[in-house]
Amino acid sequence: MRNINNKVDFLKESPTRKIDAIRERLKKENKDIIVFSAGQPSIPPPIEIREIMGKMLKEESMNLYGYTPSQGILELREAVSDDLKLLGSIDVDPSSIVITAGGQAAMFSTLATIIQPGDEVILFDPTYFGYKPLLNYNEAKIIRHYVNMENDYQPNIDELSNIITKKTKAIVMVSPDNPTGRIIDHKIAKALSEIAIDNDLWIINDEAYKTLIYEGEHEFLYKYAPENVISINTFSKDPSIPGWRLGYVYGPKSTIDKIKLVNEEMVYCPPSFAQHMVAKYLRSDIRLEYIRFVVNEYKKRRDVMIKAVREKIPKAKFIVPKGSMFLFINLEEYKINGEEFSTQLLEKYQVASVPGNYFSEKYLSSLRLSFVAETPDRIEKGIDLIQSALQNNLF
């Protein structure tokens, strides 16, 4: 048999895809699944924007179907630039923005551009599971910085400084965080930026959930260290088009120009229809109103889940998520193995969750529960079922 590149073995199936496969099998058996595993929105884009795009689809033009510039259409890059100025008071030239085929393509293109074999990259623990296989594929050495629930999962600047070496190339930060919902503290954001400048490091700032903020505000690290920050973004969460695969990267132009080349070789150009839709969305009068509506609705669901967990699973430990879509609960006092419990919870109780070991080497008795995919009634039902599973020693 012909050999393949051994690096491909570092690319594992997404953990959530494994869960989705079980969900599909159970659905074929007519099982009703409570979905706490999904990291995607449940509220569609504004009807006004969908109606505009519906009219555009009827036009006799290739505008929505043809190739676009590899960097993305100028109209969208200009809209993103204005949006960053509106939301973060930062000035990013459209030439320093690359539109990508989703956040995953943004991650891959960025890491393939800046990482060389043997480079050390600091990952917080817990954090989003998507970075580890990509770093392994690019032959980086992962250095973990363990953040604690007791400190609201904020990084410890002194400890972080102590693990930086001459080989350290980058620090990956997700804020608002997946899975914990932590928003990086203002003082820590500035300290991280100073560390990057002083040590000539990159900060890869994953901002996927930057508009899903329930308390506090998002920190745009680019504001503090524009030559050291590459920011990863997606339109999967806002305006809720995960299946249309659109995201973007911004940072120093010289590096963005290289990221554009990698992105071009992967996908040639981002999806045309999605680009035109998001350009109109970002320019629309209803954009901020839509964000307020979505945040208010998800906050209600978050609060329903928190109340239910406190009442039904009283020994669960967690922080109240200030952003993103998830509640990360530590069930250590129930003495469970998170992965085994999550699997049995789905198979026997039809509640889909994501175990903590996908995000962490430390929080192995934890579950990530999404509060955005289900209605309040079904959220309460799902927590009732988790309570039953724990009471019935399902582990």
Image: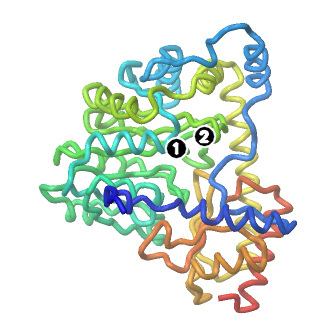
Quick one: 242 or 180, which is closer to the camera? 242
In the current view of this chain or complex, which residue is farthest to the bottom?
A: 393
Q: Can you give x and y, in whole percent of width and height, for residue 140 in the image? A: 26, 57
Q: Residue at x 60, y 65 (%)?
A: 18
Residue under label 1, please give it.
208
Query: As shown in the figure, which amino acid type bears the numbered disc 2?
Result: Ser
| Quarter placement of the N terminus | bottom left
In this rendering, does residue 136 appear at all?
A: no
Is residue 171 left or right of 315 when viewed as pictured? left
Q: Can you give x and y, in whole percent of width and height, for residue 264 in the image? A: 39, 29
Residue under label 2, please give it.
236
Q: Which of pointers 2 and 1 indicates the residue nearer the eye?
A: 2
In this rendering, does residue 9 appear at all?
A: yes
Q: Can you give x and y, in whole percent of width and height, for residue 200 in the image? A: 17, 44
Q: Can you give x and y, in whole percent of width and height, for residue 124 in the image? A: 38, 61
Query: Residue 123 sits in which quadrant?
Result: bottom left
**Mark 2 residue element:** loop
Q: Are marks 2 and 1 in contact (CB under 8 Å)?
A: yes
| Quarter placement of the C terminus | bottom right
Query: As shown in the figure, which amino acid type bears the numbered disc 1?
Result: Ala
Quick one: 13 or 221, which is closer to the camera? 13
